[in-house]
Structure formats: structure tokens, C-alpha cells
């Protein structure tokens, strides 16, 4: 049996919402005064034996709520969850950016985390100098960097410019150099954020490959935090699914993937109007969203070449001017990648084409002559502002729909896996 | 097999104090790089390069000589004004620059602190060290003038108190470090204090015998200089180089005690704040 390298026990993290100002000073003083008298903190959600007042509930928020898990040596574990599930908070605690409100994390071996590549790069310093600086910030010692410097430079593929200040680099070169240092980081436990989702795909693959290599051959433990399910599935064998600050499931990565998808489906059954996982002042509130085909039928799956309409229903809580309304529809694929954003802002005639009757009508139609996206499952995020203030934002799965397999190019074949995101119309001469 | 006792790292809520000297040493190469970065980037793309470190005190001395020496005619205990001001400016510079550069650690480094962990103390330590490099360059200028006056005039009477000079430099750094990290810690949540620092440093200089000798102060104001931990050490410096000034070991003792206290309070404060300041910055 391999040994446990990370043990997380009853982890809580509480955040204070709102602005810092005079009010927080008063709260700080009352907290301090309670501490002096040996009483409970009147401004915390944790450890209360008495009832919690509404005021505290409103202004405090538990980003992590009693999280416990163990990770064994050599495992590659993916931590997944939707926006706001607590992934980033957990990541910050594991990387010691900030500390838990209560509970503990115990670690065996050297731990390092990559929340960003190229942290601490100074534009005036040369590539070589920045390798040393960045390496040292990530916790490498001088001899370790000395030993690897040639390999890092080689890996980055920018030998020619290595003694030029990085401010003269193109952004691509900059990222390659930063990645090269990161890929050569030596530690027993490596915590990775979605940072790997930037940079050019080719080079990204090279880095992921390098890290995968290390995990398999040297028994390094990897924690990968992401909402990009495909990347997690590639790299990890186990997973932890977070929801609303708590662990919902943990187990093999396939199990996690199934639960994740199932959750998404459940959410769908709740009417949009009654959903509470939304933010905004509610001046304009989304009440329903429908996918409608050319025959005016409400559907849930379409073909890539079909004419469809996305109909968004909403309710206005106060009389507003149509000029100041913006509604966005974002289409994401199931791996979390954003495929497209459609906005009323893109239509310069939006306000002239739709007079105030549109508001009393209560819905808006976005019509696509062809949707042109490759087959798969998709989810829609709804976003709206009134007078430039956020009025409603449903971050997850306002609607999920699928695009069915289809011979788009009439070639007798359906689209192959891994052939991008969209269909382009083209001719060969 | 699992042994619950043997963990390399335990992350617990903030509030528990732990000074991890071993960890700090692990990062000594990083501190060296920070110092190098500060120094190298300071004069990148300038023609005069490190000479800028010298031009600054030189011009200040010139201005002081004209304004305080020639126009206001503030006495300098009979010491030539140039040397008198240059001693004050060079050593005061070490203190004030060290303090200002350590007084905004958290706010100016929030970007990098928010992305990676390394002992936060490495930053103020590196800053203090960088200031020494600058200080040593300025000492060259100071000694240039000093030796001229030593060999060609009768005013300079150096004495054995010169042995205290390195100690006083260290003391200045300790005070600067202590106050700097206290301000750093306090400004993470309430930014008010950072506005005070700029003019506070200036006011402080006027409450320190930099441009005037202590002998010029009426006795009813002496308490200001007793509670100011920089004042008597500064006067000792002047005495050591010129043979003119007041040396009082009781007040020097008080000043030394205050320095140590500031250091301890600073370290405790810093240790507490570094753990969760990211939530507040």
C-alpha cells in the first residue's frame, strides 16, 4: 500500500463579502473585543452554538464547507466542479496562498504549485536571468536550476533570444519560456491549475506530456484543478467532484465524469424562473429558455445544419429603456470550453428593430440559419445587464442541448472525434 | 505505513505563530536574485548607471548647504556644512529608504503573492539588502569628501567611536525593517497608513539631528529626541567622524531597546498577516 501524501481534514474557508471600509473596522473591533473576553466571534459562521443572525449570513460566505480527503503517493487526481464550487479556494489553500479558517492540510514531501506560469518574470531581465528568478520563486535551489538550465532552454526552443530582455519577446516566446521552467519543476507533489489551458496547443501538449511522464516514471503526485473535463480525463485517474464548497463524490475519474454530467441534467429539470444559482439585481430576470426548430416545435437536440431559434423569456421588474438592455447567450461545450457568445450588443439595429413592445412581449429570439457546431453536448450561459449593471446571470446550464451526429459535408462520413469545434463551409478547387 | 506524526508540512488556520528559519534559508538564492534584480533593473537603459545613486545625495547636500547653511544659517557645531550634511543625508538615507521600501510589501507584491508561495519575509530582507548596496556606493562619495576635509582642514577629529558605526547601520536597518513590516501588515486591510508614510518620513527627518546638531536644541524639546530611536545614534555618528556632538549612553540604550521591540512586534505582526492577507488586499 502506498503512503498518504496529502491529508485534508475538515477544511473550512470563510470569506467576507462586500467592501472594506468603516463598517468592517467596527466589525473587526467587535470580533477583537469578543476574543478579549473569551467569547465566540459574533462575525463568523463557524463554531456558532447560538443561532446565526441574518446579517452574518448575508455578509459571510463559506467557500469550503467541511472538506476532507486523502491522496496517495503517485496518484494523479483531478479536482473538478462548476464555477463557484470551491475549486480555486481549495487550490489556494493547498498552495499556501491563503490559510483555512479551520481544519488542516497535512503534506508529506515537497509540494509546489503552478497557478500561473512565469510568475515574477521581470521584463528588464534576460530570458536566462528570468529562468533563475522564476525557478527560485517556485522553490528550486541554485544547483537544481544550474543542472537543468540547458535542458530548460532547449525545451523552450528560444536559444537565440535567451540573453535578450524578455520585454522584447513576442507573447508566444514569453509563454514558452515560462512553460519550460514550469515543466522542469521538481517536486514530490505538483498542484496544477488550468494554466495549462493557455499557450499554443502544440507546446501545451509537449508540457502535459512531460508532466505525465514524470508522474508515471518518478511516482510524482499530481493534483489538477480544472473545469475542463477532457483535460482532466487525459491526465488523471482519480477525481474529486466539488459542489457548493463540499465534496460531492470522489472516486475514479470515469465515475466523476458520469456524476458531473448527471448533475447537469438534474439542474435542467428545475425551471429557470425558480433557479437560485444566479447573480444580479433582478431588474431583468430570465424566466425560461427554449430551443425551437423551423416547425415551431420545442426541441432538445438538433442537427448542425438545421435552422433553429433560441428563445429567451424574461421578466422586467421596473420600467426600463430598451436602449440600455444587453442580453448575452454563451454556448459552452461539455468540457467547459466556450464555443461562442451571441449578444444583442452585436446587432447595431437592436434598439430600432425592437421597440418597447419587445419588453411587453417578454421574450427575444436569436435565430441561426445553421448552427454549424460539431455533434456533442452543449450548455448555455445567460447573462444580461441593464444600464450597465448586472441584472441576471445564470452561470451554469441555463439550457443543455445536444447536436446529433450528421454527415455535414455529405461525404458519406460523420465527423471524426477531435476534429475541432465547428464546421466551416468550403470548396476545393 | 502511515505514521500520523511524520508530516513535512501542516497547514493550519492563521493565528498560530511559526517562524521557519530553515525554510527561509532554503530560499536564500531567491533573496540573492531579488537583490540582484532590484540593483540591475534600477539603472537598466540609463547612461549614467549606478552613478545615479551618487547624484541624488550630492544634489541634496548642495541644496541643504545653500538653504540651511547659507540662507537660514543654521549652526553646525563648527563643522564644515558639506560634511555635516553629507553624514546626515547618507546615513539618514540608509534608514529612510529601507523603511519606505519595506512599508508596502504586501500591496505591491499582491500579484505575485497571490500566485505562488514562498516565505514572504524574503522580500523585505532582500529590500533591506538592496539598500545596503546603494548605501555602500554612497559611502564612497561620503569618504571622498570626508578624507578631503580630514587631510586638508583641521575640523575633523575622528575617534574610537568609529567602531560603533557598523553597529548603528545595523540598528538603523532593524528599526527600518521593524517599522516597515508593521506598516506593510497594517496596510493590507486599511490603506490609510500608506499615505502617511511619504510625508511621515520627511517629518521624521526634521525630528532627527540631520540638518542641525543636537546641541542646538532647547532642553524642553529634548524628550522628542529621546523617544526618537534614530536621534542619538545619528548624533553618535557625527561625533565619531568629527569629534563634535553629544554622546549619551542612557539614551542610546533606550534607542537600542526600542529597536529590538520594533523588530519583535514587526515580526509577529508580519507572521500573522502573511497567512491570510490575500483575502483582504
Image (cartoon, helix red, strand yellow):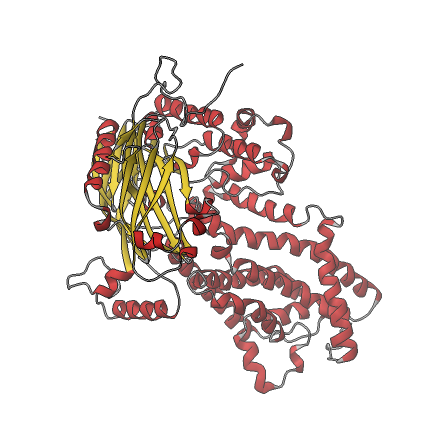
Q: Which percent across, then down, holds residue A261? A: 24, 33
Q: Is residue B148 visible?
A: yes
Q: Which percent across, then down, holds residue A391? A: 35, 55
* Image quadrant containing the N terminus of chain A: top left
Reply above or below: A66 against B138.
above
Residue at image location 37% in from the left, 31% down from the top: A371
A329 or A200, which is in the foreground?
A329
* Total numbered labels: 0
Q: Residue B92 vs residue A145: left or right? A: right
A13 or B125, which is in the foreground?
A13
Q: Is residue B2 visible?
A: no
* Image quadrant containing the C terminus of chain A: top right
Residue at image location 19% in from the left, 41% down from the top: A269
Reply above or below: B135 against B213.
above
Residue at image location 79% in from the left, 64% down from the top: B150
Q: Residue B199 vs residue A298: left or right? A: right
Amino acid at each position: 500500500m502506498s503512503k498518504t501524501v496529502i491529508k485534508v481534514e475538515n477544511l473550512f474557508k470563510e470569506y467576507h463579502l462586500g467592501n472594506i471600509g468603516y463598517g468592517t473596522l467596527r466589525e473587526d473591533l467587535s470580533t477583537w473585543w469578543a476574543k478579549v473576553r473569551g467569547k465566540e466571534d459574533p462575525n463568523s459562521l463557524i463554531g456558532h452554538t447560538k443561532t446565526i443572525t441574518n446579517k452574518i449570513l448575508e455578509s459571510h460566505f463559506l467557500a469550503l464547507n467541511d472538506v476532507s480527503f486523502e491522496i496517495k503517493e503517485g496518484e494523479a487526481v483531478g479536482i473538478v466542479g462548476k464555477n463557484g464550487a470551491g475549486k480555486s479556494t481549495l487550490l489556494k489553500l493547498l498552495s499556501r496562498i491563503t490559510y483555512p479558517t479551520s481544519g488542516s492540510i497535512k503534506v508529506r514531501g515537497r509540494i509546489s504549485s503552478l497557478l500561473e506560469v512565469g510568475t515574477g518574470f521581470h521584463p528588464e531581465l534576460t530570458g536566462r536571468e528570468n529562468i533563475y528568478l522564476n525557478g527560485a520563486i517556485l522553490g528550486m535551489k541554485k544547483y537544481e536550476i544550474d543542472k537543468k538550465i540547458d535542458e530548460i532552454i532547449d525545451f523552450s526552443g528560444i536559444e537565440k533570444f535567451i540573453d535578450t530582455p524578455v520585454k522584447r519577446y513576442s507573447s508566444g516566446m514569453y509563454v514558452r519560456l515560462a512553460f519550460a521552467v514550469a515543466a522542469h519543476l521538481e517536486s514530490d507533489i505538483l498542484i496544477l491549475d488550468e494554466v495549462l489551458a493557455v499557450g499554443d496547443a502544440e507546446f501545451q501538449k509537449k508540457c502535459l506530456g512531460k508532466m505525465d511522464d514524470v508522474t508515471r516514471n518518478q511516482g510524482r503526485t499530481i493534483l489538477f484543478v480544472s473545469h475542463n473535463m477532457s483535460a482532466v480525463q487525459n491526465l488523471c485517474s482519480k477525481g474529486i467532484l466539488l459542489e457548493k464548497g463540499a465534496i460531492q463524490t470522489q472516486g475514479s475519474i470515469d465515475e466523476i465524469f458520469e456524476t458531473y454530467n448527471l448533475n447537469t441534467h438534474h439542474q435542467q429539470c428545475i425551471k429557470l424562473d425558480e433557479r437560485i444559482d444566479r447573480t444580479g439585481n433582478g431588474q431583468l430576470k430570465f424566466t425560461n429558455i427554449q430551443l425551437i426548430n423551423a416547425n415551431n416545435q420545442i426541441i432538445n437536440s438538433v442537427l448542425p445544419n438545421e435552422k433553429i431559434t433560441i428563445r429567451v423569456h424574461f421578466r422586467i421588474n421596473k420600467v426600463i429603456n430598451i436602449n440600455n438592455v444587453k442580453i448575452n447567450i454563451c454556448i459552452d461545450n461539455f468540457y467547459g470550453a466556450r464555443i461562442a457568445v451571441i449578444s444583442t450588443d452585436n446587432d447595431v439595429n437592436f434598439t430600432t428593430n425592437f421597440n418597447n413592445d419587445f419588453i411587453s412581449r417578454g421574450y427575444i429570439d436569436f435565430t441561426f440559419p445553421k448552427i454549424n457546431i460539431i455533434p456533442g453536448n452543449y450548455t448555455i450561459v445567460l447573462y444580461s445587464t441593464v444600464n450597465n449593471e448586472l441584472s441576471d446571470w445564470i452561470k451554469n446550464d441555463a439550457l443543455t442541448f445536444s447536436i446529433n451526429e450528421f454527415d455535414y459535408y455529405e461525404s458519406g462520413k460523420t465527423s471524426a472525434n477531435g476534429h475541432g469545434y465547428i464546421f466551416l463551409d468550403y470548396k476545393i478547387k | 505505513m502511515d505514521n500520523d506524526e511524520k508530516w513535512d508540512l501542516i497547514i493550519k488556520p492563521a493565528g498560530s505563530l511559526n517562524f521557519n528559519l530553515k525554510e527561509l534559508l532554503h530560499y536564500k538564492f531567491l533573496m540573492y536574485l531579488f537583490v540582484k534584480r532590484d540593483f540591475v533593473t534600477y539603472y537598466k537603459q540609463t547612461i549614467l548607471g549606478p552613478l545615479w545613486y551618487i547624484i541624488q545625495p550630492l544634489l541634496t547636500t548642495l541644496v541643504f548647504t545653500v538653504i540651511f547653511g547659507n540662507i537660514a544659517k543654521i549652526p553646525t557645531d563648527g563643522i564644515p556644512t558639506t560634511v555635516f550634511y553629507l553624514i546626515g543625508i547618507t546615513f539618514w538615507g540608509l534608514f529612510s529608504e529601507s523603511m519606505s521600501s519595506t512599508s508596502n510589501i504586501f500591496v505591491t507584491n499582491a500579484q505575485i503573492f497571490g500566485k505562488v508561495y514562498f516565505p514572504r519575509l524574503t522580500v523585505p530582507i532582500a529590500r533591506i539588502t538592496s539598500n545596503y548596496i546603494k548605501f555602500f556606493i554612497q559611502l564612497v562619495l561620503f569618504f571622498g569628501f570626508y578624507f578631503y576635509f580630514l587631510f586638508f582642514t583641521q575640523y575633523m577629529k575622528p575617534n574610537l567611536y568609529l567602531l560603533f558605526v557598523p553597529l548603528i547601520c545595523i540598528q538603523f536597518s532593524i528599526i527600518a525593517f521593524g517599522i516597515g513590516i508593521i506598516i506593510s501588515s497594517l496596510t493590507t486591510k486599511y490603506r490609510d497608513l500608506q499615505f502617511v508614510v511619504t510625508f511621515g518620513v520627511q517629518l521624521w527627518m526634521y525630528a532627527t539631528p540631520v540638518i542641525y546638531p543636537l546641541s542646538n536644541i532647547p532642553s524642553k524639546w529634548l524628550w522628542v529626541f529621546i523617544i526618537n530611536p534614530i536621534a542619538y545614534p545619528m548624533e553618535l555618528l557625527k561625533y565619531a567622524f568629527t569629534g563634535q556632538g553629544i554622546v549619551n549612553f542612557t539614551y542610546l540604550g533606550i534607542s537600542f531597546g526600542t529597536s529590538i521591540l520594533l523588530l519583535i512586534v514587526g515580526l509577529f505582526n508580519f507572521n500573522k498577516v502573511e497567512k491570510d492577507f490575500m483575502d483582504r488586499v
